[in-house]
Amino acid sequence: MEKFPITVAGYAKLESDLKRLKTEERPAVIQAIAEARAHGDLSENAEYHAAKEKQGWIESQILELEDKFSRAQVIDVAKLDGDTVKFGATVTLIDEDTEEEKVWQIVGDFEADVKERKISVSSPIARAVIGKAEGDVVEVAAPGGARSYEIAKIQFV
């Protein structure tokens, strides 16, 4: 069983999602199945079949989250420091072509969310900057072509 890194916030979100599935979603779908059964013939009961399908999805999500819990290696970013980029760092990058500034936090694969400016530790940008220091220039092989970024700032927050 391979461990994977996750931030404290990411772990808390996993925990919250699992709790919601077990205490809200699972009981609701069980109730929906019971109501659909009360309507009679199950062979042609669309509500029953839809509820059973949703139950299967919920149970698979619960199993997946429980697996993630068992393999999670929680890393408290607030306790990290250093001069080089590593998991959990918030990195400010400057695009060498456009001078555009981008700020990304490097997080675990399961908590990556571009809208929240969080990128996966296995993403091309993260792989390019890990181990580098402020002032270093990195080449990132992106789908739109290679890009050069200067590491302007490294923070652990």
Image: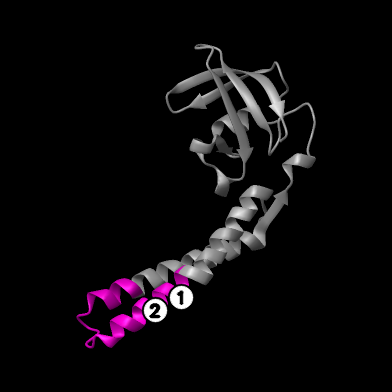
Asked which quadrant contains residue 139, the reply is top right
Q: As rendered, which of 138 and 99 lies closer to the eye? A: 99
Q: As rendered, which of 114 and 130 lies closer to the eye? A: 114
Q: Residue at x 22, y 83 (%)?
A: 43
Q: As rendered, which of 93 and 19 lies closer to the eye? A: 19
Asked which quadrant contains residue 33, the reply is bottom left
For badge 1, the amino acid type reads Pro
Identify the residue at the far left of this view. 44
Tag 1 and tag 2, C-beta contact below 8 Å: yes
- Pinpoint residue 49: horizontal percent, then vertical percent: 29, 75
Does residue 1 appear in the picture of this structure? no
Q: Which residue is drawn at 52% across and 71% down?
A: 23
Q: Which mark is residue 27?
A: 1
- Pinpoint residue 62: horizontal percent, then vertical percent: 52, 67
Which quadrant would the C terminus be assigned to in this image?
top right
Number of other residues with Cα within 10 Å of mark 1, as a class: few under 14, some 14 to 19, many 20 or more: few
Label 1 sits on a secondary structure element that is helix
Q: Residue at x 35, y 75 (%)?
A: 52
Q: Residue 19 carries which label?
A: none
Q: Mark 2 points at which residue?
A: 31
For badge 2, the amino acid type reads Gln
The stretch of residues the image draws in magenta is 25-51
Q: Is residue 149 magenta?
A: no
Q: Which residue is drawn at 39% across and 79% down?
A: 31
135 left or right, relative to 112: right
